[in-house]
Amino acid sequence: MACDWERAGGAGECYAHSVAGRPSAQWQPLEAHLRAVSGLAERFASAFGSGAWGRLAGRRAIGGCSGGWRRAFCAGRLAAGPREGHGDVVSPEYGCEREAMTNLCRRRLLCASALAVGGSLAAAAGPAQEGIRGFDQTETDADKTRPWKPFSDRKVRVGIAGHGVCQFGLQFGLQHHPNVELVAVSDLFPDRCADMARKARCAKTYPSLEEMVKDARIEAIYCATDAPAHARHAILCMEHGKHAATAVPAFRGDIEDAEKLLECCRKNKGLVYAMFETSTFRDDLYAMARLYAAGVFGNIVYSEGEYCHPHVLGAPTLGSYKDWRKNGCPMWYPTHATAYYVSVTHRSFVDVSCRGTAPFDPARRVPNAIGNVFNSEVGLFRTAEGGLGRMMVCNSQGEYLEAGRVRGEYGGYDKTFIGDATGKKRYDEAVRNGLQLKKGALPPGVEAGGHGGSHGYLGDDFIDSILRGRKPAVDVLDALNMTTPGYYAHLSATKDGETMKIPQYSL
Ligand SMILES: NC(=O)c1ccc[n+]([C@@H]2O[C@H](COP(=O)([O-])OP(=O)(O)OC[C@H]3O[C@@H](n4cnc5c(N)ncnc54)[C@H](O)[C@@H]3O)[C@@H](O)[C@H]2O)c1
């Protein structure tokens, strides 16, 4: 194991892990590990209304200790190869620079780690959220000077279903929102349901969503259930007269679900349907959407979106209810990528040509239950404007990405805006006229959360759209325009890139 900390200018390779006996190939880079621990500490502390404190405890551990720690552990790896330490993180006591970590640093780090471990031990569902990428991305450059203004005193009576591997039902701050009364929670597994109720401090539980929808008090339900059930569950909620939100994607695998969901929304125009696509409230996409709406880019000539998971190839993916994660293909989960066109423009893709890559070792190209062999798929989509979009869902090593960028006629956006003379003029005018490119503050008690600080904003957007009777950030058309193209992209990949038409939806 080569480790060249000093020569790499402080970016040497150092690893840590949390699970006793985890093979060294699956250890995380130390920085990522500490950030994940910090995120986990935040989520755990959130249950007690102290999420920010938890995060900061974790961050101080990173800032205060990581340099010495990294050196110490690098030295340790050089000297002895990967070794497991005590507790839940690798200890420098196994390295050569035993004294590099002060007792203070050690205390802080162990404190953050203990919080994190407590959080996961306390979870009856037993999620290894620390290892779930995206949850650690809580940084957001929201404009704190623009306070959240209550629109009304009314509390929307909400139910939440789903407390699985990602415990995603409670990730969006609905239970903390000042305009929400959390009436009930539900999960099919009694231990998960009980854990959810305890964490949300909710007295009422139901053994299933099917039971919960009968509760006449509940006005709105968020379904963080398994992806193949999203459309069915949203329809069930709306048919019982309730506003509905689901996690992504809008549907998974069954294309008929798209039409059924659309038909249900057509019949229930007074109800809000929202999909919680996290990319939509990432800082960069948020800015792009406002610039596009203000006409700054002109038409989008080309866009790119990526959902790239650098998990160890061949390693088991996350668990899931009825193993839905194992039975599909990359493009059935396209929305983190396709949002970088659809949520920017609120327009659609019209056709796609897509290719896939299967494992390089032919012996490992075993079709799964849907006959898929691809572990990555890359699609070239024609947009409704006449431009092109390259969207990909890629399981490979490299940077973890839920990311994207656009290039327009007069300007583009890739982490920042760059435009020609017309683009710059339009940009300056738009900003002069009050265009806000940053998200405003969240309601008190609601935290931005993971996936680029998007969680709290999606929860708030759902409630605000109910209160105001407006469209949510991701309505049914955007939800389908992000999800359906992936279905056709995979079909194209199975036909070696044949161009497939994509249905166009309207309400
Ligand atoms: N960045 C993101 O947007 C992001 C990240 C992670 C997960 N997700 C999405 O969040 C959702 C949940 O993810 P997960 O990993 O926790 O899934 P999971 O499969 O582990 O858990 C789903 C849970 O839903 C419960 N459930 C299913 N049907 C139910 C019913 N009828 N009534 C009550 N409960 C029911 C199951 O018991 C299970 O606990 C998925 O759809 C996933 O796609 C999105």
Image: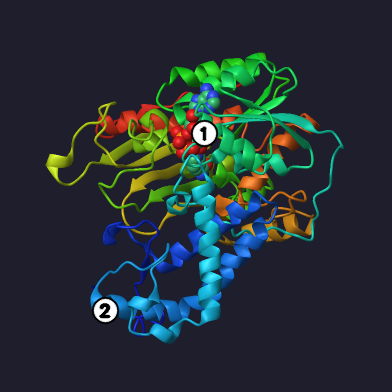
SS category of the residue bearing label 1: helix
Alpha carbon distance from label 1 to label 2 = 44 Å
**Which quarter of the figure has residue 150?**
top right
Looking at the picture, does residue 224 appear above or below residue 96? Answer: above
**Residue where numbered disc 2 is placed:** 78
Percent x, y for residue 122? 53, 47
Q: Which residue sits at x=51%, y=63%?
A: 113
Percent x, y for residue 292? 63, 47
Query: Which one is nearer the viewer's eye here, 55 or 285?
Result: 55
Q: Which residue sits at x=73%, y=24%?
A: 219
Q: Is residue 451 left or right of residue 156?
A: left
Looking at the picture, does residue 62 appear above or below residue 68? Answer: above
Say what amino acid the circle numbered 2 marks.
Leu
**Mark 1–mark 2 contact, CB under 8 Å?**
no
Say what amino acid the circle numbered 1 marks.
Asp
First in residue order: circle 1 vs circle 2: 2
Check residue 191 in the rendering and tell me which mark sits there, or answer none: 1
Residue 409 visible, this angle: no
Residue 380 visible, this angle: yes
- Quarter of the picture containing the N terminus is bottom left
SS category of the residue bearing label 2: helix
Q: Is residue 218 left or right of residue 113?
A: right
**Which quarter of the figure has residue 380?**
top left
